[in-house]
Structures are given as C-alpha cells and as structure tokens.
C-alpha cells in the first residue's frame, strides 16, 4: 500500500473501503442508500418523518418483504397513504403535509427544526415549555 503524502495509510484505506449501510432499513434516508455524502440533521429529519408515519398508520411507510424492496420503495418514494381528512380512520391533512415535507427525497428541501415547530401539525404546542 502506498502512503499518500497528504493522508496517512489508515485514511487512505478508509477512503477505498466500500461503504456499508448500517441501521434499520425502514428508516434509512435515500441519500445514504445512494452512497452520497450526508447531512446528519437531514438524515434525522427523514427518520422523523418515517417514525411519524409509523406512529399514525401502524407500519413504516416503505415496509416490504426484503431489504432490497424496502430500499427500492425508499428510492422511488413508493408508499401507501391512508385516506387524508378528519375522519376516524384518516390521517389529518396537517400530518400528511408534515410527513411529506420530512420525507422529501432531496435532503436540502426537507423542513428544518424551526419550520417543523411552526408547522400547523404542532399548532398549540409550546415547545419552550416542553423541557
């Protein structure tokens, strides 16, 4: 192994290592699956959207039989939405809008923490009083 004059041997080896995906498949953001450089906050916001969907619907949005199928669903944003509305078996429009903005496949377009707190889904929540 040649030592790169700008980096040590271990850094050089790490750069050449094949990237592995680690984590629960249902919650992994598409940029991780694609092997792109990632913003940790954007990844967390993606997972928040997936978790919110799961809390409201009962199963993860991209759930499937195999990891490959789950990853395909994530990359294609393939998921089933419940009826949207205010009925007993419906997801509210506010919840659906928030989830859609969190699971935006473009990490730069996902809501940020400030905008999440201002979203109509959280109307009436005083975040400053939560601590």
Image (spheres, rainbow, N blue to C red):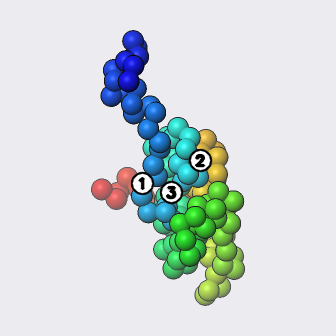
Q: Specify which label sits upstream in the sequence, 3 or 2.
A: 3
View extreme (front): residue: 1
- In percent of the image, x 48 and y 74: which residue is there? 55
Tag of residue 4: none
Using the image, tell me which numbered label, if any, was put on residue 28: 3
Element under disc 3: loop
Q: Quadrant of residue 83?
A: bottom right
Q: Secondary structure at mark 2?
A: loop
Tell which circle, 3 or 1, labels the residue nearer the N-terminal end.
1
Task: State the residue in front, 28 or 6.
Answer: 6
The image shows residue 14 at horizontal and vertical percentages of 39, 33
Q: CA distance from mark 3 to mark 1?
A: 9 Å
Between 72 and 18, the residue placed more toward the observer is 18
Q: Which residue is mark 1?
A: 22
- Residue 45, relative to residue 71: is it above or below? above
The foreground one among 92 and 106 is: 106
Task: Please tell me how crowded label 1 is: few (under 14), some (14-19), or many (20+) other residues with Cα within 10 Å.
Answer: few
Q: Is residue 38 left or right of residue 69?
A: left
Task: For residue 2, say whether it is visible.
Answer: yes
Residue depth check, mark 3 versus mark 1: number of the one nearer the observer? 1
Task: Report the mark closest to the observer, 3 or 2.
Answer: 2
Q: Which residue occupies 49% across, 63% down?
A: 25
Mark 3 surroundings within 10 Å by alpha-carbon count, few (fewer than 14), some (14 through 19), many (20 or more): many
Spatial CA span between label 3 and label 2: 11 Å
Q: CB atoms at circles 3 and 2 under 8 Å apart?
A: no
User: Which quarter of the figure has residue 78?
Assistant: bottom right
The tag earlier along the polypeptide, 1 or 2, is: 1
Residue visible at 64% across and 46% down?
106
Residue 124, position as x, y percentages in the image:
49, 63
Numbered disc 1: secondary structure: loop
């Amino acid at each position: 192994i040649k030592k790169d004059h700008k980096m040590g041997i271990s850094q050089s080896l790490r750069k050449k290592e094949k990237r592995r995906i680690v984590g629960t498949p249902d919650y992994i953001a598409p940029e991780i699956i694609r092997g792109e450089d990632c913003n940790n906050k954007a990844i967390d916001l993606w997972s928040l959207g997936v978790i919110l969907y799961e809390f409201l619907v009962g199963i993860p949005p991209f759930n499937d039989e195999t990891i490959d199928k789950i990853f395909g669903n994530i990359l294609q944003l393939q998921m089933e939405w419940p009826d949207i509305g205010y009925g007993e078996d419906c997801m509210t429009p506010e919840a659906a809008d928030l989830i859609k903005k969190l699971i935006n496949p473009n990490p730069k377009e996902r809501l940020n923490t400030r905008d999440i707190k201002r979203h109509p889904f959280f109307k009436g929540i005083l975040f400053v009083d939560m601590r």
